[in-house]
């Protein structure tokens, strides 16, 4: 069942959707490749991008397309920077893609829950989105780190407990970055929707 609040935040317009996907992909290009992000002083948008994409788009092709973009950006980094970035492509690299899929899945689950509660107002909608983001980021953080510890070949002399203790403090940073970008994206969408509605009303006056 459609959720009016959610539909206003994430309109079903094909034109808006294509434009949004292009912006999401460009944001990954601008922040994922460190030459751009270091100049602009921007953190990586990837985690927020996959969550928002899952929240907005039903098709798994969107997930596949964004995964391709992420891999191509990483490969481009290797071509540009050589050995400095080649270490990123360890046997643990698929874990990064699984983490992104978990974020997309968290967005999809949030969307389904909101569609099942069509009467949810804006506070309830935003609260559920925030809860889903926390769950998604936590799951993605766990997947990425477990696979990196297990398959990267860099931690043969470190115990799992020591590794977990060393990386756990970084979770809050990932949560903060993803939440900030997701909030910016949602506010931008809500603002653009209000502008479109205002322009439409003026045309019909």
Image (cartoon, rainbow, N blue to C red):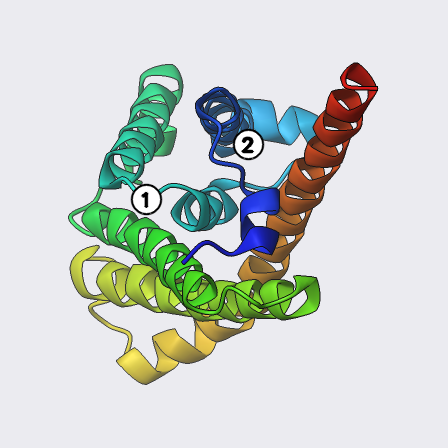
The residue that disc 2 covers is: 31
Could you say where residue 83 lies in the image, as x and y percent from the top left? 31, 28
- Tell me if residue 30 comes above or below residue 48 in the rendering: above
Query: Quadrant of residue 111 in the image?
Result: bottom left
Q: CA distance from mark 1 to mark 2?
A: 25 Å
User: Camera-side residue: 25 or 165?
Assistant: 25
Could you say where residue 169 lies in the image, as x and y percent from the top left? 55, 72
User: Camera-side residue: 9 or 60?
Assistant: 9
- Tell me if residue 90 comes above or below residue 157 in the rendering: above
Could you say where residue 158 lies in the image, as x and y percent from the top left? 28, 74
Q: In front of the other: label 1 or label 2?
A: 1
Disc 1 packing (10 Å; few <14; some 14–19; many ≥20) = some
Q: Secondary structure at mark 2?
A: helix
Q: Residue at x 65, y 37 (%)?
A: 189
Q: Residue at x 65, y 65 (%)?
A: 121
User: Camera-side residue: 25 or 82?
Assistant: 25
The residue that disc 1 covers is: 58
| Residue farthest toward the front in the current orientation of the protein | 205
Q: Earlier in the sequence, mark 1 or mark 2?
A: 2
- Tell me if residue 10 comes above or below residue 21 in the rendering: below
Q: Residue at x 43, y 61 (%)?
A: 115
- Is the residue under label 2 in contact with that under label 1 (CB below 8 Å)? no
> With 165 as the anchor, is 177 left or right in this view?
right
Which image quarter holds the C terminus? Answer: top right
Could you say where residue 62 lies in the image, as x and y percent from the top left? 31, 35
Q: Secondary structure at mark 1?
A: loop
Which image quarter holds the N terminus? Answer: bottom left
Q: Residue at x 23, y 46 (%)?
A: 93
């Amino acid at each position: 069942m459609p959720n009016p609040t959610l539909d206003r935040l994430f309109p079903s317009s094909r034109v808006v959707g294509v434009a949004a996907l292009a912006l999401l992909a460009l944001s990954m290009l601008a922040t994922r490749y460190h030459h751009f992000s270091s100049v602009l002083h921007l953190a990586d948008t990837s985690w927020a991008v996959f969550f928002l994409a899952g929240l907005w788009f039903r098709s798994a092709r969107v997930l596949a397309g964004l995964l391709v973009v992420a891999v191509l950006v990483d490969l481009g980094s290797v071509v540009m920077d050589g050995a400095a970035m080649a270490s990123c492509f360890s046997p643990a690299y698929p874990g990064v893609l699984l983490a992104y899929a978990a974020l997309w899945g968290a967005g999809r689950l949030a969307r389904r829950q909101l569609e099942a509660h069509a009467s949810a107002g804006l506070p309830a909608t935003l609260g559920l989105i925030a809860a889903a983001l926390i769950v998604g980021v936590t799951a993605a953080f766990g997947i990425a780190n477990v696979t990196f510890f297990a398959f990267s070949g860099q931690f043969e002399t470190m115990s799992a407990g020591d590794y977990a203790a060393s990386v756990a403090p970084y979770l809050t940073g990932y949560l903060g970055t993803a939440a900030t970008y997701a909030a910016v994206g949602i506010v931008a969408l809500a603002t653009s929707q209000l502008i479109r509605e205002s322009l439409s009303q003026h045309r019909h006056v």
